[in-house]
């Protein structure tokens, strides 16, 4: 790596001063030269990070990427002075773009039509409906057998396929999947019969296919208002939730929240402020925490060719717990995928979901298309004093995650090693508890246990972790990034 001059390159490092006068306030560069300063030669294009030109003058360290040949200020690359000095001149250096997280491919433009709707209007209508349903009480009826139930499963399958094949509905397909349950499966009344539920589903499916989301939303809002006018038993819910959590029955506690009419703590501005305080900004990315700065190794996409619908069904059967913002429970997904009432439709759905999972594992996707899949229902649990945030993710996301981790089990164990008790060592957590207890009960043992001393959320930079995963477990990295 060499210094860029008019005749070529001679060394890897050089010191520079900024030329431009419009330097951002956060930029670490020294004061740029004044009009009275002696002329200096600009030797490279501006630093891509801070947009400031390089100058041959004592001041700042800069470094050139081996792959893209672009020069960066060392500080803009997250390199301290000592980090910079520790890099041997003969060692290739790769910038955060070439050694970090690669770019994703933008989603297919939304040019589709859906009934009377088209383009951006489809996204606006679905987004408006989704923003409403995430705060609703659970009130979905069991997916019925027969034509109506099969049509519902087929519609979910169509939408998942639309995202997987990058159709002109890719931008809204997963959002629609996470909206369809709350709009089409709302109980018409508290004691509605199965026949009434089937008739309601058949009628709503026609409205859904016609793109009449606003009418569906209005009907569901009216139903939710009736639910909210009833009595609430929040105190018993809180006590039941606390009892289940203390007994270690986490899945049962999450299910209680999904089926109850109230959360452990009432949502107030004060509660929201407390929850937000537990989500500080991430620590800055630091090069010293990266395991490597060379281009990450690749893996064969064929690694996931054997991930099929059978694996999806197996994961769905073992997935439990509460539902996420969409309100679609583990029982609903298991019924759609595994029930004999929907044998053909369930097989098609599991096949489509396997294809979707393979894409998420092998291709960096547009994050705007999967944002509803990654959303969580945030609940505040009273710690007395304080509040503990609990996030309940979408069941579909948990099914996909369980499928992938089972498929990559050997790679994850190999990467985690013996230090990771939850993955690298079989029964590792239990063994650690017994070992600590054995030492603790000895008379000569003295110990101080400090638990939950501070909030560790975002103490590390997530991008640092994701970049490191590209080296530690390449097969798992694309899925985690997505």
Image (cartoon, rainbow, N blue to C red):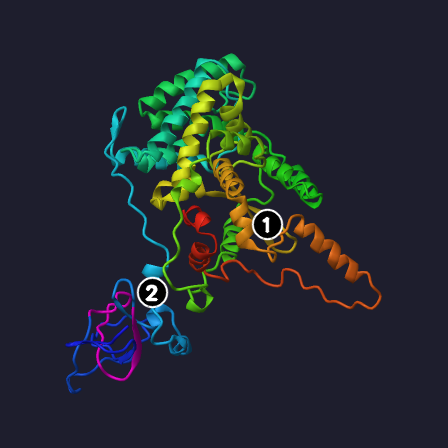
* Visible residue check, residue 432: yes
* 212 on left or right of 349: left
- SS category of the residue bearing label 2: loop
Residue 449 higher or lower than 124, as above or below: below
Marks 2 and 1: in contact by CB < 8 Å? no
Q: Which residue range is magenta in the image?
A: 45-64
Q: Which of marks 1 and 2 is nearer the N terminus?
A: 2
- Residue placed under numbered mark 2 in the picture: 94
- Between 440 and 311, which is closer to the camera in this rendering? 311
Identify the residue shown where x is 79% and y is 67%. Answer: 445
Identify the residue shown where x is 55% and y is 28%. Answer: 331
Residue 32 figure quarter: bottom left
- Between 163 and 369, which is closer to the camera in this rendering? 163
Q: Which mark is residue 423?
A: 1
- SS category of the residue bearing label 1: loop
Where does residue 360 sit, x and y in percent of width and height?
40, 41
Magenta stretch: includes residue 141: no
- Between 154 and 357, which is closer to the camera in this rendering? 357
Q: Crowding near pointer 2: few (<14 within 10 Å), some, many (20+)? A: many
Q: Which mark is residue 281?
A: none
* 394 on left or right of 73: right
């Amino acid at each position: 790596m060499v210094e860029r001059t008019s005749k070529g390159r001679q060394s890897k490092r050089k010191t520079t001063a900024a030329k431009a006068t419009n330097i951002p306030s956060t930029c670490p560069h020294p004061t740029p030269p004044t009009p009275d300063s002696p002329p200096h030669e600009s030797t490279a294009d501006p630093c891509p990070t801070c947009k400031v030109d390089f100058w041959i003058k004592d001041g700042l360290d800069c470094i050139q990427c081996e792959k893209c040949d672009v020069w960066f200020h060392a500080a803009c690359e997250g390199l301290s002075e000592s980090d910079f000095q520790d890099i041997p001149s003969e060692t290739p250096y790769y910038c955060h773009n070439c050694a970090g997280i690669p770019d994703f491919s933008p989603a297919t433009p939304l040019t589709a039509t859906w009934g009377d709707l088209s383009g951006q209007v489809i996204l606006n209508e679905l987004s408006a409906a989704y923003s409403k349903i995430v705060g609703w009480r659970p009130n979905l009826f069991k997916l019925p057998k027969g034509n109506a139930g099969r049509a519902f499963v087929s519609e979910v399958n169509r939408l998942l396929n639309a995202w997987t094949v990058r159709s002109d509905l890719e931008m809204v397909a997963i959002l629609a999947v996470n909206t369809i349950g709350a709009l089409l499966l709302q109980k018409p009344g508290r004691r509605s019969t199965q026949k009434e539920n089937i008739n309601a589903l058949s009628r709503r499916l026609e409205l859904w296919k016609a793109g009449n989301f606003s009418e569906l939303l209005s009907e569901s809002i009216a139903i939710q208002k009736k639910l909210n006018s009833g009595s609430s038993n929040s105190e018993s819910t809180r006590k039941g939730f606390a009892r289940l959590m203390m007994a270690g029955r986490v899945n049962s506690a999450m299910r209680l929240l999904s089926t109850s009419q109230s959360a452990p703590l009432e949502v107030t501005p004060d509660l929201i402020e407390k929850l937000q305080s537990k989500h500080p900004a991430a620590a800055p990315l630091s090069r010293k925490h990266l395991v490597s700065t060379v281009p990450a190794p690749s893996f064969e996409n064929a690694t996931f060719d054997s991930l099929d619908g059978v694996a999806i069904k197996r994961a769905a059967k073992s997935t439990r717990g509460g539902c996420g913002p969409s309100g679609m429970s583990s029982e609903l997904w298991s019924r759609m995928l595994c029930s004999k009432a929907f044998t053909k439709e369930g097989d098609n759905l599991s096949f489509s979901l396997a294809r979707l999972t393979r894409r998420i594992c092998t291709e960096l996707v547009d994050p705007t298309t999967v944002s509803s899949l990654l959303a969580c229902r945030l609940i505040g649990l009273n710690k007395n004093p304080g509040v503990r945030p609990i996030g309940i993710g979408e069941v579909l996301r948990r099914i996909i995650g369980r499928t992938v981790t089972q498929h990559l089990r050997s790679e994850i164990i190999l990467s985690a090693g013996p230090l990771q008790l939850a993955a690298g060592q079989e029964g590792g957590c239990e063994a650690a508890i017994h070992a600590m207890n054995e030492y603790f009960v000895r008379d000569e043992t003295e110990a101080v246990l400090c638990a939950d001393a501070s909030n560790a959320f975002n103490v590390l930079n997530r991008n640092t972790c994701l970049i490191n995963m590209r080296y530690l477990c390449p097969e798992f990295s694309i899925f985690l990034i997505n």
